[in-house]
Image (spheres, coloured by chain):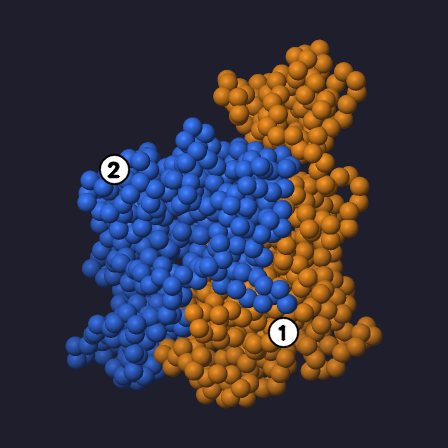
Chain colours: A orange, B blue
Amino acid sequence: MEIAANTAPVITIGSAKEFADKEVTIRGWLYGKRSSGKIHFLLVRDGTGIIQAVVVKAEVTPEVFELSDKLTQESSIIVKGKLRLDGRAPGGVEMTVTDLQLVSLAQDYPIGRKEHGPDFLMNNRHLWLRSSRQHAIMKIRSTVIKSVRDFLDSNGFILIDAPILTPAACEGTTTLFETDYFGDKAYLTQSGQLYMEAAAMAFGRVYCFGPTFRAEKSKTRRHLTEFWMVEPEMAYCDLEENMAIQERFVAYIVRQVLEKNADELKILERDIELLLKVEPPFIRLSYDEAVDIIKKGGVEIEWGDDFGSPQETYLMEQFDKPVFVYNFPAAVKAFYMKRHPERPELAVCSDLLAPEGYGEIIGGGQRSDDLEYLLEQIEVHKLPKDAYEWYLDLRRYGSVPHGGFGLGIERTVAWICKLDHVRETIPFARMLTRIYP
Amino acid sequence: MEIAANTAPVITIGSAKEFADKEVTIRGWLYGKRSSGKIHFLLVRDGTGIIQAVVVKAEVTPEVFELSDKLTQESSIIVKGKLRLDGRAPGGVEMTVTDLQLVSLAQDYPIGRKEHGPDFLMNNRHLWLRSSRQHAIMKIRSTVIKSVRDFLDSNGFILIDAPILTPAACEGTTTLFETDYFGDKAYLTQSGQLYMEAAAMAFGRVYCFGPTFRAEKSKTRRHLTEFWMVEPEMAYCDLEENMAIQERFVAYIVRQVLEKNADELKILERDIELLLKVEPPFIRLSYDEAVDIIKKGGVEIEWGDDFGSPQETYLMEQFDKPVFVYNFPAAVKAFYMKRHPERPELAVCSDLLAPEGYGEIIGGGQRSDDLEYLLEQIEVHKLPKDAYEWYLDLRRYGSVPHGGFGLGIERTVAWICKLDHVRETIPFARMLTRIYP
């Protein structure tokens, strides 16, 4: 890295505007090139932005001009030159190159300007991440994740990591990845919630945030086998307070993306009008009301059914802001859900559905704080009682009303970016037929 | 929750000082109790702190006094009363109770004031988390994790999550957890580094931060089978810059804990003098120099050996601030490490060892950017070349000098808290003989 050592400071493209009229060094890769005989326009990327570096034949050595002529897409290069503000340039600043160094010449970069099928792109995910669209999605993903943490950290929640390797299943064992654990069986977690209940009794407000796993044979645009979920849990909390926090939380996340990722939303051609509407209060529908709407729309559903993708999609095409559907039939929800005091066929719970047809991004609710009820449910669902002894302890020693929710990061990012498929929302997607790279 | 609905606002103990001379409601659990005939001193915890709530017989109804008499440890209660500042009280504020409501009476809480063995406590981890010492450790853990993210986010790093389920092993397959992946084999990640190398070529500076796994049959005070690791990776970075960032990073983390967790460090009786010394520059020793020191100390080692626990412990008893040991023999490091240009038997790498005998908290180094060398190493180590094709692509298309490091959260927390065993540094530890609760 010879050039880097000389007097022109090494800067990132993201900070280039601060160095207008200065000579600087930028270390990056060739993203694209245009030539017109005596001038080469190099588009250089370094991960923080893209800058146009102009090589004028008359102003550089013959070696530099020749080198810039033979540069191929994704070759790694170090460019030195003077920056100047230019409103028409991407990023508002352009470089006039004075020196250029080749770090490594790329031969036949496989991703070109032509169209590629999704399988080809996913096989080359390690390279596809360099494209501006994927880059934009990953930057928004990182804003979403940071906003999740910032909101919770500043609202009295403590991060308590849930274990990934678990001895028992949260909601049945049919969709679990299993592994040998020194002679015993262990499963990859589907949810940290039960552990968060224990933690909420110790810390009041807690959250875990990690990867979760579903060995589902679903091949839809909404399913990943490995995805990230944040799961807050609150002691002394009822469903109303739970939903109120969820809507503040989701509104905060969307607002942060609007503030920090205007450029990325533009690259994705996202219509932000609908995102601007994501402010509390969200719409609240009881399950009963939601079923009526879906029925009237001619989509198949009977009272008592869980919502599938067609039901959620139809419902969320009717609204332009997020919708809580609350009080589902207990039969379609997990065994630990609290029953409605007046209508015991209902669970005290809510799903939060995203607009524009995206559907569920949050599932949440109250957990039963009653020992007898849970013992009964464990029997009804034929769960291994021994494995749940610690969970039952939470009702033996200082049981309190409590609840929480889980927000899926990938579905949230898909909605905010308005993507067709969740596979683009995570750096290295894991799906039914995909575990490479 | 009848009391909660009335006029005294519900507050957390952590914010009690702001409500001096006001009547408030606190929802929590009974942590301890002292009585003197006509007065009960209730220690109430709510996860944000502990407050003394005083019940004076003459000032409450007979029912409230009787109830406070029969309260047992860890019963959940709601107390209402007037707060007043009191320098002698824990947290600096005390409550004079006017009303008290029992939410749930705890019977025979298993963790008492007597000594318990570690197995008993780990079996009751879901309850043990409520004790003030464990509470303090978890709060410090959450500060460490937040500091990790804040430092990286504000130093130009982008979070790019690495996958947990991987088709190939980063460093051999003997210590991997294996799972069936729809008919194929998949392994739980030991490190996200290879993926971070791909991401660094797209984003410049990146990090992943998630759980990693080792199916090691080690039963030591330093080993967990599941632990959290942050792995930053930087394009266009050499070992010097890499170490410089590491020392700023570790110093920042320690400084944040000193600032935010003074109370918790006090509960742990941590001598903070040594933590105050954790400021750059750290000590730098070549592997050659470190071996000499260890040899002179009479601890068994030959040039070429990797450091084990006895070597690290001895070395780090000699220093009162962190030490980089750099340029280890390539033979004891991973296949992808870059070789030293003048001494090819060495890898361009460093470990960061924590003082007070704690040893390695960071492993890092330069990755080879040379395609031919890596092809050779894959053959030498008999690795499946197909599985590494994507990794090799990073050297085919725009290879650049790059490096990074991995910091283990649990070992860092163990050192900062000065704990004997890493099992207390993570909410739900997974070890050779432990996967419950």
Q: Residue at x 73, y 50 (%)?
A: A120
On the image, the x and y values in percent for residue A135 come to 65, 43
Regarding residue B83, the answer to whether it shows in the image is no
Residue A369 seen in the figure: yes
The residue depicted at 58 percent of the width and 80 percent of the height is A347
Q: Where in the figure is residue B16, as x and y percent of width and height?
A: 34, 60
Q: With respect to residue A413, does B12 lie above or below? A: below
Q: In which quarter of the view is residue A283 placed?
A: bottom right
Inspect the image, locate mark 2, and give the three-letter code of the amino acid beneath it: Asp
Q: Secondary structure at mark 2?
A: helix
CA distance for labels 1 and 2: 68 Å
Give residue A326's mark: 1
Residue B292, which numbered label?
Answer: 2
Above or below: residue A405 compared with residue A48: below
Q: Residue at x 58, y 63 (%)?
A: B185
Figure check: B172 above or below A20: below
Q: Is residue A29 left or right of residue B288?
A: right
Q: So how many labels did they put on this image? A: 2
Packing grade of label 2 (10 A; few <14, some 14-19, many >=20) is some
Q: Which mark is residue A16?
A: none
Give the image location of residue B356, x and y in percent.
24, 48
The image position of residue B21, as x and y in percent, is 31, 61
Q: Return the residue found at the far right.
A: A298
Which residue appears at 33% of the width and 38% of the height? B287
Label 1 secondary element: strand
Given this view, does label 1 or label 2 mark the residue nearer the observer? 2
Chain where mark 1 sits: A
Q: Pick the residue in front: B35 or B334.
A: B334
Specify the amino acid type for callout 1: Tyr
Q: Nearer the viewer, residue B414 or B339?
A: B339
